[in-house]
Each structure stands twice: as structure tokens, then as C-alpha cells.
Amino acid sequence: MTPSVPTEGSPADAGAKRGAAEPASDGARQTPKIRIRDVHKSFGAKQVLCGMDLDVGAGESVVVIGGSGSGKSVTLKCVLGLLQPEEGSIQVDGEEVVGLGGESLEQVRRKFGMLFQNAALFDSLLVWENVAFGLVQGQGMGRREAKDIAFDRLASVGLEADVGSMSPAELSGGMRKRVGLARAVATTPEIIFFDEPTTGLDPIMGDVIDDLIVKSVRDLGATALSITHDMASARKIADRIAMLYDGRIIWAGPTAEIDHSNNPYVDQFIHGRAEGPITVMANA
Amino acid sequence: MPILQPIGRTFLAFLETVGRLSLFAAISTSHCMRPPFYPRLLLRQMVDIGYYSLPVVGLTAIFTGMVLALQSYTGFARFSAESAIPNVVVVSITRELGPVLAGLMVAGRVGASMAAEIGTMRVTEQIDALDTLATNPFKYLVAPRLIAGIMMMPFLVLTADIIGVFGGYLVAIFKLGFNPSLYLKNTWDFMEAIDVISGLVKASVFGFLITLMGCYHGYNSRGGAQGVGTATTNAVVSASVLILSSNYLITELFFAR
């Protein structure tokens, strides 16, 4: 069932003991919440994903690590249907997403919440309107009721009520991330994506956001798929870590095993070494 | 043939753009007609396009009317045809100058701001965020702007017509010494319903083109601040060219014999 057997001579030969895409938990073996198989995506001549496989089990928190430009964000966008892969299959709860459009795609998207890298808050709306957006526009809830929920969500990410009446432009980076998180969880989604949740934050604020992510995901019982290159963050929020390199998952395993992966690519990445099998081009 | 290659490539790129734009227009128009509608957003756009464009359109119209009366006088005085001035002013303003100049001014003001706003939303992932919140960007961003453009431009042009004719009246009366009541009577007598109606039809078409160009270029902008800048320029230039070319076609449709 897991097609991601590392090919001869590939970076994945170096030490992947388990199939790269295979979920860890037994429960997740039934039907993965998200199933990505042999996905290829290129932009012009640049091949970003070439044969990516990944399973995310229900209730699991998977973090995909990888260098800048390795295709992490593209993966998330493909799952959300914001980008269409040229080849491969992506299933959410067993339903194929590739090629889906219109109302059916909107139905699938209702299962998702997403925290964007720079929070992507709507400038033209107040903070509470941002948080309530999915409830009002996506679920048709009344503004008054949605406003109460929005303020509850803001409180749950540690923001005072007066922040709710501010404009996103008045917020600091950490506050924007918290509002983005409150917006992502406001609709109680089944699946939450976190795109570089700690990028651009100081280490302490990064840790605060990580704690909030862990708490929010646990409280909702949601499935989480995160992408990051911040190892401290990955260790904190992940049940399982997968490394994306050269358009494919070259290693995946439980968080505790990443230090003993015996994969030189993973070792180089998690220790942040310039020397190793991963070469960084000057123009990358 | 190395000479033909770039010509062929440019032509194919042009066809591709036309295809993309047509598809964008078709999707946008279909979303204008299907619920859910966003009355709050529509109202905001109507106020932004219709109300906040009034000063710039009004100023353009009054000076155009004034110059028209003055120039017509200097020309017509040679043939002792000064009495045709009310006719020239009212026909020129209602048929051509009102819609075209209002269209160009609104393209500069509204088309540019739409492209910049939607373009910034694109490059800061706000449009992706809309999608993930199960809200169709065409419905939420594009449809209210298109409807507001189509509805408010005739209102602006009607205002421009009145102010433009009034500009001509001011110059004719206070500078050229025309009889006020005679000037007004001539204006009224010369004016035909078709002049005004054709101008209002043009206004609606221009409103559609301006907002379509603003939304299209903003929606497809790429690459940060520079991309948004390019989108804004393209929105204004393409809207202006389309206004001038479609103006000819509509004139042909209404008045060609």
C-alpha cells in the first residue's frame, strides 16, 4: 500500500528504515486523513515535486521539514487545491482532490484550517472580523454569534479583547500569528495546516506559538500537517516528521527517532551543517 | 526564420492573454448572477466608485464643457455659426466626452486602486486564505466590483453630462455674451434622448471594462511589490485602450448609417 519504497541510489537509501509515507499510529493505518501519492508538480522547467508520497493519519500531527524552495508550501497548496499537480493522487478522507473544482472543492476545503506564513490577515477587516470570517462567510453564521466566538478564540490564543477591535496593520508579528491561529481554528476544522508557523518570530514567541498550536490541535482533536525548517518547532509539535528533499520524502519517522535516522541528509539538516550531501547553490 | 519567431511568439502570447481574459470575464460574470451575494461589499464598492469619483469626474466635465464652448466659438465665429455652440456642446458631451473622459478618469482612480488592492491580497496570500476559508474570491472580490462598476458608471456619466453642459453654459454666458434663456432653450431643443442613452450604455460598458481590468490584473499579479506595480499600470493602460476602442464600436452600433 505504501509505494514510496526508496529507489536505488536515491537520498532515501541512506537510512530510511520505514516507508517514507507510512503513518506511525495503528489507528492511522485504516484510511489516512490525507494520502499523497506520486505527486509531481513543476513550474516551467523547474520540477518542484517529483513523486512525493505522504500519509497523514487521523488525529496525527505530521511535520514536513526541508530547505527553502524544497516544495513544502507547494505540497500544502496542492492538497488544498490551490495548485494542480501534473501527476499523482491526493486524497482527503478517501476523496480525490486532484482535478476537483467548484462546489465539491469548497466542500473539501471546509474541513481545513490554515495558518499562513505571514498570517495573511485581511487588511480591510478588523481583527475579530478576520477570526469570524470562516464562520460568517463559510458557514453562514450570524455576525453577532460569530463575534462572540471570535473573541473566545482570541482569548484562547492569549489576546486581550481590545485586540479584537484593532486593524491587522496595528499588530506585531507574534500577534498576527496568534490571530492567524485563532482564525484557522475558529471553524473547528478537522485538518489544520501550519505554514512555517514560527518563521520571523523571536525564539520565545516561537515557543509560545508552538505551545498554542499543540494546545489548539489537542483541544480540537484535529489532524495537523505543518511545514517548517525550524527544528525546535518541529520537535515540539510533531508526532511524526518527514523530510522533503529533491521533490520527494526521503525519510519519515516518529519525532523521537529523528536523531537516529542514520540518514546523512536528515542529519545534516537537523544539525544545520553547511557541509554534507545537501549542497546549497549560491542562487538558491 | 529568426525574424518570424518573435512575431509568432508575440502573437501566441497575445492569443493566450485574450483566452485567459475571456475565461476570467466569463467566470466573473457567472458569479455576478449566482448567490451568495455580498450586499455589504457591493455597497462599499458602489460608494467608492460612484461617490468618491464624483469630484474628479465633475472637475473633468466642467473644464471640458468650458473649453468646448470656447473652442467652438473661436472656430464657428469665422462662419457666423455661433448659434450652433449649444448644439455642439450638448451633443459632444453626452455622446462622447462625458462617457469617455469619465471612463478614463475612473480607470485611473478606481481601476488602479482595485489592481493594487487585489494584487497586494494575492502576493500576501490573502486570496489563498479566502479559498481556505471556503469563500470563492470571484464571488467575494470580483463580483461586487463588477456589479458596482456597471451600476455606478452611468450615474457618474449622467452627472458629468449635466456638469459638462453647465461648464459650456458658464463660458457662453459670462465670457461670450450669449443670452442665458436662449442658450438653455437651444441646448434642450438640440438634445435627443438617443444622445444621452448611448452615453449611458457606453458608461455601463466602460464600468465593466475598468473593473474587469482592475480585478484581472490584480488577481494575476505575481512577485511582490514590483508585480503589484506592473499590475496597476497594466490595469490602467488596458482599461484606457479598451475604453477608447469599445467607444468606437458602440458609436458605430448606435449612429452608423
Image (tube, rainbow, N blue to C red):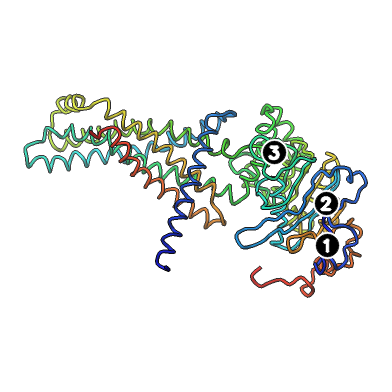
Marks 1 & 2 on one chain: yes
Q: Which numbered dot is residue A62?
A: 2
Label 1: which residue? A6
Marks 1 & 3 on one chain: yes
Residue drawn at the location 79% of the way across and 68% of the way down: A272
**Label 2 element class:** strand
- In this view, the residue in front, A105 or B244, is A105
Q: Is residue A274 left or right of residue B172?
A: right
User: Residue A71, position in %: x, y?
Assistant: 71, 58
Q: Quadrant of residue B202?
A: top left
User: Residue A126, position in %: x, y?
Assistant: 63, 39
Please indicate, yes or no, whether residue B59 appears anywhere in the rendered image: no
Categorize mark 3 by other alpha carbons within 10 Å: few (<14), some (14-19), many (20+): many
- In this view, the residue in front, A130 or B3, is B3
Q: Are marks 2 and 3 in contact (CB under 8 Å)?
A: no
Q: Comparing marks 1 and 3, which lies closer to the viewer?
A: 1
**Label 1 element class:** loop
Residue drawn at the location 37% of the way across and 47% of the way down: B241
Compare marks 1 and 3 and give the one earlier in the sequence. Answer: 1
User: Residue A206, position in %: x, y?
Assistant: 78, 55
The three-letter amino acid code for the residue at tag 2 is Val
- In this view, the residue in front, A162 or B106, is B106
Q: Which numbered dot is residue B239?
A: none
The three-letter amino acid code for the residue at tag 1 is Pro
Mark 1 belongs to chain: A
Label 3: which residue? A131
Please indicate, yes or no, whether residue B119 appears anywhere in the rendered image: yes
Residue drawn at the location 37% of the way across and 31% of the way down: B154
